[in-house]
Amino acid sequence: MSTQSQNRLQPYLSPAGAWAVALGTSIGWGSLVVTANSYLLKAGPSGSMLGIIAGAFIMLVISRNYHFLMVIFPDAGGSYAYSREVFGYDHGFLNSWFLILTYLAMLWANAASLPVFAGYLAGDIFRFGNMYTFSGYDVYFGEFLISAAAVVISTLLCMHLKKLTGKLMTVMAAVMVLAVSVCFISSASHGIAARPSFIPGKAPLLQVLQIAAISPWAFVGFENISHAAEEFSFPLRKTFGILCAAVVSSALLYLMVILLSVSASPSGYADWLAYLSDYGTLEGVRAIPAFFAANHFLGNTGTAVMMSALLCMIMTSLIGNTLALSRLFYAMAKDGILPEKYADLKDGTPYRALMLVGLTSVLIPLLGRTAIGWIVDVTTIGAVIIYGYVSACTITVASRQNDHTEKATGILGLGFMILIGGYLLIPNLFGSGSMETESYFLFAVWALLGFIVFRRILRKDTERKFGNSIVVWIGLLFLILFISQVWMSRNTMDATASAMSSLREFYAASGVYEGEAGMIEAQMDMIRRTNARSLIMVIGMFALSLSVLLNNYAIMRRRAQESEIQLGQMKNIANTDPLTGVKSKHAYSEKEREIDKLIACGEAGSFAVAVCDVNGLKYINDTYGHKAGDEYIKKAAMMICRIFKHSPVYRMGGDEFVVFLSGEDYEKREALISGLRSISEEHIQSGEVVVAAGYSDYESPKDAGVKAVFERADRKMYECKQELKFRGARTR
């Protein structure tokens, strides 16, 4: 293959490949673990399934928004490209900043999950070379090696075997679906007694809403084919069906895993709730409920089948996120956000961008599973921001096109994201907090880093593409302050809970009455409610201050635009000749200064100056009056403009005009001047307008400025004037 870069990404993804990439990216390790330790323990099997179905409906709305924008903006970069095109480069950067965090977190989480599952299923085989403990997690060199190897393999596949990777993704997605289906059907054939269907003591509707609110995490990644829109080997109109198929497939897999996880419990446990409540203390296949159920119904064959599904889930997620990130980096490099080298293509593949993804990810497992878990928590907020941007872009573009259906789906999608964002960002308002305290802090730090990176972009932005939307940065500042406030609130609540726990243990050891221990719980609930009310008040004040600030800014911006319009109108008046409508002498002076600067820098290029003079104007004025003279001048200007269609014409005053010839007119300058002379010679006999003209080329380095070129052209014009006089034309 050629090693030279190509101009565009090369198509390779079939509809089946695109479905596999979308499904494989959205279904990772979490489908086997989070369903057990989060979904089921929050809402039970019925609440989890209803929440997943509600979440799937939300994602179908988002799928429609993606399809609408993908057809209009079929470029690499996905939602980054959409927000850039619709709202400007500042919005594009902000969108891409959270896209990067979201995809990187999912990639890192799946890479780090390999040693965890290996520990469950193969014991301590990879637990050698204990290096250190980070946030309570022991980091082993052996576990780091297996995670790093998975990152390297997925990166190399995407770099060198792109077409094979697309087919491999299709095979792995099919294996994943088939394996889970086989184990689920086996368990269902024995009957699934999913009791209790909800978590006792909690409102069922609230349980369903809790799962629906974190549903973006369950599906995030299904949209990553939008980054590869340039690489589809099929019409873009098919993307909606592909996205819907991926969302529905993901939802069905989650539903099967949920039912599989509650279909069997180890001996000693009364039901699935008792089993999962003891989840963190178990080892081996019992530590993964879906694996235990498969083993329970199919023996070692079931374990092997689920292991094949697990490996396919992890590898498809690694490859899918690597592909999405590399295309995002490629698009950002083309726009100057990243260094230009990351936009280089080799055989239609952004190989440098892929290398950047691999290098960014290969060392991350050294942080340990706990820290990566904090980062993964942030992906739900990232998904809300990304999907919110896509919905807002849909509303804007559909409004411009007067497309009410697409506008409605955009409004619906944005409404869902606002509600989910409120649930995620305001802990204790709708129940217990949805993220770890450290995750709020990491989100604020990432947003702050965005400010720092944007400053670097501004310094290198010679084209002035960035820094035009102050609203973006006021909004980001508000988000940082808001998230920091939430983090401080959560930190205080954690400290309070720890203190209360110590008091509870003290009273228990002292033989305190059970009623007094209950008083501690009541006090803790009161503190939570007070904290939630205080947080809402602070958020309300932040929001009100921000709205007033933005309103004031809008007023100042409108006034500035009005002033700019007035200045532009004044400048246009100064640069336009009022009689003929061509450019004025003032405009000529500005043009002369501009070209003189280019000449001084050696960057002037090729151009010529034509000087034109109207013959017989004094005779017209003296004989017929100045009004007739003005009409004569206007006819002369129209005649000159018709000849020099692609060049600016300037009236220097009275009967003299100057033309700057460049581009097409420069290439045809001799023919244009000859044509003007021929018309003038014909007009001598008919009594119409006669114009004498001469031109001269810019000669580098002989000419120090435009003046020298003008003077040569002026002399040639006078020579033409004498020739026309000899042929019978009137002079002044």
Image: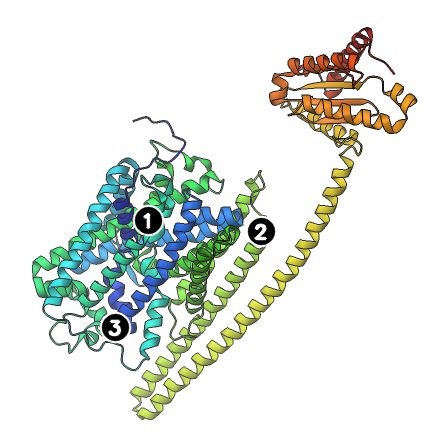
**Which kind of residue does numbered mark 1 sit on?**
Asn
- Residue ID at (26%, 76%): 198
Residue 19 visible within the image = yes
Q: Nearer the viewer, residue 515 or 622?
A: 622
**How is colour applied across the structure in the image?**
rainbow
Number of marks in picture: 3
- Residue matched to label 1: 321
Do residues under tags 1 and 2 come within 8 Å of each other at their CB atoms?
Answer: no
- Determine whether the residue tagged by mark 3 lies in a helix, strand or loop: helix
- Residue matched to label 3: 46
Q: Quadrant of residue 505?
A: bottom left
Do residues under tags 3 and 2 come within 8 Å of each other at their CB atoms?
Answer: no
**Which kind of residue does numbered mark 3 sit on?**
Ser
- Residue matched to label 2: 469
- Where's residue 334, x and y in %? 46, 38
- Determine whether the residue tagged by mark 1 lies in a helix, strand or loop: helix
Distance between the Cα atoms at labels 3 and 1? 31 Å
Which badge, 3 or 1, comes first in the chain's sequence? 3
- Where's residue 245, x and y in %? 28, 54
Q: Quadrant of residue 136?
A: bottom left
**Which kind of residue does numbered mark 2 sit on?**
Ser
